[in-house]
Image (cartoon, rainbow, N blue to C red):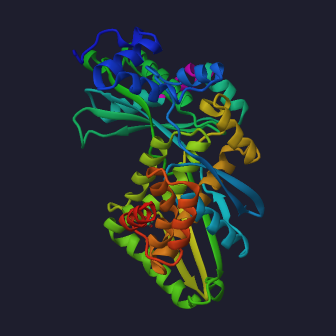
Amino acid sequence: MNQNIKGFSKLSKQEKIEWISNTYFSNPAKATETVKQYWNSNEDLQKLHDEFIENTLTNFYLPYGVAPNFVINGKNYTIPMAIEESSVVAAASKAAKFWEQRGGFKATVINTEKIGQVHFLFKGSFEKLQNFFSVIKPKFFSDTENFTKNMQKRGGGILDIELRDKTSDIENYFQLHATFNTKDSMGANFINTCLEQFAKTLENEAREYNNFNEEEKNIQVIMSILSNYVPNCIVRAEVSCPIDQLSDDPSIDSKEFAEKFVNAIKIAEIEPYRAVTHNKGIMNGIDAVIVATGNDFRAVAAGVHAYASRNGSYSSLSHAKIENDVFTFWIDIPLAIGTIGGLTTLHPLVKFSLEMLGKPSAEELMKIVAVTGLAQNFAAVRSLTTTGIQQGHMKMHIMNILNQHQATKEEKAKVLDYFKNNTISHSLVVDYLEQLRK
Ligand code: MEV
């Protein structure tokens, strides 16, 4: 069967599924059935999802769970989490409960500035370009008035536009480096629309500028695009308590645990191999809320990891200290996210998440997301420095193993009971299940 096809996007959904099933599957009927069993019986809802992207065949489910008992700045939240990994929601819930009894989480938005750039080539001196830029700068603002009017009404807009000389890196390369406040929207469309207008204004004005020679008049815009690196769009989340309250387990000494915890964080600060896994744990919490609230998890991840390397070496996003017998644990994290626009009004479950969170502003959502990341990190580092991660992790994983092996309700109960007090591993669970079935 020919595996290349022309005009695939023009086929109906049914035809696309048929082509895929017939081209790639030994049992096309079964392949079609697999795809179709995930269709939603509500046709309008299915159409809505079909139209989010292109060449849609079906839906790809992620479990949607919630972590209750979060207290952030004195307010209670149940946090929605869309994630496929077992133990993450349980860990967040456990950490939420633990800190609820110790004053809850505190969170502060430090800054909300977003960035976009027009990258261009100019064959002339920086000085001449600077003079030109200072003459035409007001034009960038007036030419974008149509799009900025509404944003300004909401208290946002273009904050500033700078000209940057990048010729020491690439010959003739300069930038317009613009900063924005996009209030409750993530703002990607707003920023990109402004930038594309800046690029037009730049090229047009250069062509008309009498002090430029022919070569200088010919500015070449390479591209105009927002940056997902947002080191000035930062939220801080933190928890603290007297060190003697840090353990709720009589077998774990609070002071020893506090010191071990701080050392674990120090290791993640200086050792990139550990930092990546440490931050991955933080992202378990962050991504799950980002997905459940309809935000762009790729943008968040790219920005977060760039921020984690901002000092030249990949490092921990969270920090901990003990001062005057008080343990403090905190995270600073860049989050360019929104609670209006995008999927927020389109996806019924995103609307559901936002309503459950009390219809937060973007700044409030930044706090919620950062807190979830910190809670996740606390739970992971607590397990790692006390019982080890496998105990809790495998407990949650047992269910996946049992489902993979189509265990009955009775078998599940027996297996769970047996592994309450026995070491858990994938093969041990499977062996025990097979024994039961003999
Ligand atoms: C697993 O998804 C995340 C952890 O590896 C995070 C960590 O090591 O801190 C447990």
Ligand 1: give its quadrant. Answer: bottom left
Q: Residue at x 77, y 60 (%)?
A: 75
Magenta segment, prevailing SS (helix, strand or loop) = helix
- Specify the quadrant of the image occupied by residue 338: top right
Q: Is residue 171 above or below residue 199?
A: below
- Specify the quadrant of the image occupied by residue 275: bottom left
Q: Is residue 99 above or below residue 117?
A: below
Tell which of 170 and 22 is nearer to you: 22
Q: Is residue 80 visible?
A: yes
Quadrant where the N terminus is found in the figure: top left
Q: Is residue 320 above or below residue 195?
A: below
Tell which of 268 and 92 is nearer to you: 92
**Residue 411 percent coordinates (x, y):** 53, 60
Q: Is residue 233 visible?
A: no
- Left or right: 100, with 83 as reference point: right
Quadrant where the C terminus is found in the figure: bottom left
- Specify the quadrant of the image occupied by residue 224: top left
- Left or right: 177, with 190 as reference point: left
For residue 216: magenta? no
- Span colored in magenta: 135-145
**Residue 221 percent coordinates (x, y):** 34, 23
